[in-house]
Image: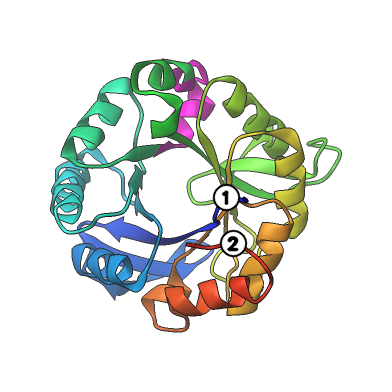
Amino acid sequence: MSVAVRVIPCLDVDDGRVVKGVNFANLRDAGDPVELAARYDAEGADELTFLDVTASSSGRSTMIEVVRRTADQIFIPLTVGGGIRTVDDVDTMLRAGADKVSVNTAAIARPEVLDEMSRRFGSQCIVLSVDARTASESSTPSGWEVTTHGGRRGTGIDAVEWARRGAELGVGEILLNSMDADGTKDGFDLAMIRSVRAAVDIPVIASGGAGTADHFAPAVHAGADAVLAASVFHFGDLTIGEVKDAMRADDITVR
């Protein structure tokens, strides 16, 4: 029996509110995170992801409170990312009610932190978020480069190799964000998903580009174990049920 594909709404949280834009710019308010989380839980979402888009020390206490309030309202796993830099940061979020944490920039600066986190809390709690954009093949072997700061800063690190390295360091999942596709609603980057799928044997979450219900099944066929979207859910373009129905129609097992 195949493992059911997960559908994961992503909530970008800025100072206690959900926001969404295109390519991480022109952000607009999308609602209260606790209310949205409860709605998605009721609609049949399999997990939720919160990303703290300010991720500053000043905003951290706000985010902890949002996580705490959300964990009291929902009954599905919650992943929290944004500004997670140390083992202590992971501990704080897990104690607030998160089930998993997503790490990005801190791991680029010091990859060993992934090993430290996964050893202390278990691989199942640690997600490596890979924000990747198209690069010239001469600069990275795969043609995709890891970025930071919402895709605005390149690192010169090959995205596929970085995903492989994360798996070696003990993370439990790869959250693969296409920065080229983010917010465009043109579909997921299927070639990128295939390349990362071939490089790792841990679950891959596809993110970036969902626009219609028909966009999700191709991402799964390309190798994604879970599909993540934001604005199409927040602004009522699609429901969780519509996405799952479309995948079922394509012979994909969903919950």
* SS at badge 2: loop
In the image, what residue type sits under mark 2? Thr
Quarter of image, res 156? top right
Q: Residues within 10 Å of mark 1 (few under 14, many from 20)?
A: few
The circle on residue 253 is 2
User: Is residue 108 found inside the magenta-colored segment of the image?
Assistant: yes
The residue that appears at 30% across and 58% down in the rendered structure is: 13
Quarter of image, res 38? bottom left
User: Is residue 230 found inside the magenta-colored segment of the image?
Assistant: no
- Left or right of 16? Residue 160 is right
Examine the rendered structure and indicate whether residue 65 appears above or below residue 36. Answer: above
Choose the circle earlier in sequence order: 2 or 1: 1
Question: Could you say where residue 37 lies in the image, as x and y percent from the top left?
Answer: 27, 64
Magenta span: chief secondary structure: helix
Residue 46, visible in the rendered structure: yes
The circle on residue 91 is none
Residue 189, visible in the rendered structure: no
Question: Could you say where residue 164 lies in the image, as x and y percent from the top left?
Answer: 67, 29
In the image, what residue type sits under mark 1? Val
The residue tagged 1 is: 3
The residue that appears at 43% across and 22% down in the rendered structure is: 118
- Could you tell me if the residues under marks 2 and 1 are in contact, i.e. CB atoms within 8 Å? yes
The residue that appears at 54% across and 69% down in the rendered structure is: 183
The residue that appears at 43% across and 32% down in the rendered structure is: 124
Examine the rendered structure and indicate whether residue 20 appears above or below residue 72. Answer: below
Which residue is more in the foreground, 233 or 255?
A: 255
Q: Which residues are magenta?
A: 102-114
